[in-house]
Amino acid sequence: GHARCRLRLQGPGAVPTLQKLFALDFRAPAFGVGEVRLTGAHHLPALLHRTATDAFDVYLHTTYAHDQVESLFDAALEWGVELSVDTN
């Protein structure tokens, strides 16, 4: 199926974390607030939506979300990680 889940990354470590996983230009002129990019990491697709200068919604296929979340956590460790769950 095409079911996806959303992860929200925000804060000063969001861009450096995503840069470790996705081959995208995250500078504001290339990827502005409100823009969306379809990309992937480790052969798994991901849709990134920049919601603010240092905030992104990352949409992942639910089938692979657990592994991708683990990769994001590993990439974010040096900036600190906080997990919160929003069921809305």
Image: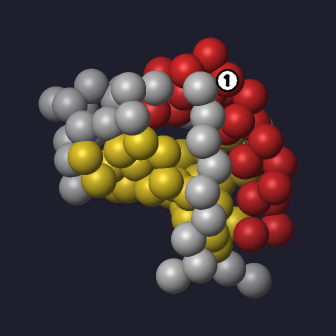
Measured from the top left, where is residue 21 in percent x and y? 62, 30
Amino acid type for the residue under numbered disc 1: Leu
Q: Nearer the viewer, residue 76 or 27?
A: 76
Q: Residue furthest left?
A: 29
Measured from the top left, where is residue 57 in percent x and y? 45, 56
Mark 1 is surrounded, within 10 Å at the Cα level, by few (under 14), some (14 to 19) or many (20 or more) other residues, namely few
Q: Residue at x 60, y 57 (%)?
A: 84
Relative height, residue 16 to residue 10 (above, below): above
Locate residue 76 relative to residue 88 in the image: left or right: right
Location of mark 1 (residue): 77
Measured from the top left, where is residue 24 in percent x and y? 44, 31
Locate residue 87 relative to residue 37 in the image: left or right: right
- Is residue 74 among the parts visible in the rendering? yes
- Is residue 35 among the parts visible in the rendering? no
Q: Residue at x 48, y 45 (%)?
A: 9
Relative height, residue 63 to residue 47 (above, below): below
Measured from the top left, where is residue 64 in percent x and y? 80, 59
Q: Residue at x 20, y 31 (%)?
A: 28
Relative height, residue 50 to residue 1 (above, below): above
Relative height, residue 4 to residue 37 (above, below): below
Q: Residue at x 32, y 49 (%)?
A: 50
Q: Nearer the viewer, residue 12 or 61?
A: 12
Q: How is the image coloured?
A: secondary structure
